Amino acid sequence: MARLADELREPWGLLLGATAGGAAWAVSVHPAAAVFVGVVVWLSRAGVATLQDRERGDGLAVTPGSPEEYWLERAGSAAYGFGELSASMERGPLEHGPLAGRIALMRPRIDDSTATLRRLAEQASLTGVALARFDLDALGREQARLARARERAGQGLTRDIDRALASLASQRAVVERLTATRERVLARMESSAIGIEGLLARLVELSAVSANGPLEPLRVLDELADTLEGVRQGLHETEQITRDALDG
């Protein structure tokens, strides 16, 4: 509980909640629903951060303070809010309505998406650690030195210098591949986290509307489900591409 209280006082969590609420309001969500989204994200972020602290003790390999941790926390907070919304609807007057049913069907996809996001975050952190081992400036200086040495070297030394230059070129190729892989993963994590937040904001608005009036056409729910499926499939595709790139 002490750890949770610390996380609730964390300014970053308050900023994240305010940002999520502002994003919800910006996409025309009702102000009351936008405030609800912000509060849910603030509380969820604290809960997720507390759980992640415990999981790090079990070997969660996500670098603290990294971009991947940031997007993982945002997605985790939105997923937690989605779970809270689903649970509240299962207990409320809308439990037998179409919205509650559709949200229940979305829940496994949310869980699968967040699990994939966690694996991607671990990959991004491991890639970042690997990149930290390379010094591109030093590699460039070494290549330039060897190139100059090759121009002056006799025929008996050029083969050895060529092998050294090939090794340096191989290292630069590794750096470029790892950098591109990490950037791809972070871009997918960002778009997916924001997508899940947007989905939560829209569902919160729909739940507020359906509690006070007729529900929007079921087509809207189908579109939201399709959006979530697109997020989920995109994450899996990125995970596979990343795995292939690293294996290569």
Image: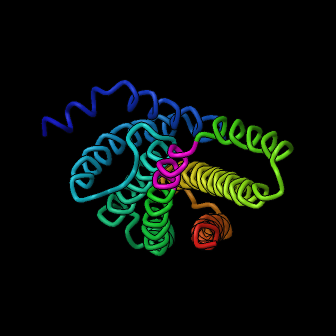
For the view shown, which residue lies furthest in the right direction?
151
Foreground residue, 247 or 37? Answer: 247
Residue 217 visible at all: no
Q: Residue at x 47, y 48 (%)?
A: 129
Q: Quadrant of the N terminus?
A: top left
**In the figure, is residue 133 to the left or right of 195?**
left
As drawn, 196 above or below 151: below
Query: How far from the left and from the top, in percent, is residue 221?
Result: 61, 67
Query: How far from the left and from the top, in percent, is residue 146?
Result: 74, 44
As drawn, 6 above or below 83: above
Q: Residue at x 27, y 32 (%)?
A: 8
Residue 58 visible at all: yes
**In the figure, is residue 125 to the left or right of 216?**
left
Q: How is the image coloured?
A: rainbow
User: Is residue 96 covered in magenta?
Assistant: no
Query: How far from the left and from the top, in percent, is residue 27?
Result: 66, 41
Foreground residue, 134 or 41? Answer: 134
Q: Residue at x 50, y 60 (%)?
A: 120
Number of marks in the image?
A: 0
Foreground residue, 131 or 210? Answer: 131
**In the figure, is residue 31 to the left or right of 175?**
left
As drawn, 133 above or below 230: above
Q: Quadrant of the C terminus?
A: bottom right
Foreground residue, 235 or 122? Answer: 122
Prevailing secondary structure class for the magenta stretch in the rendered image:
helix
For the view shown, which residue lies furthest in the left direction?
1
Q: Quadrant of residue 3?
A: top left
Residue extent of the magenta highlight? 124-134
Q: Residue at x 48, y 29 (%)?
A: 18
Q: Quadrant of residue 227?
A: bottom right
Query: How far from the left and from the top, in percent, is residue 84?
Result: 34, 55
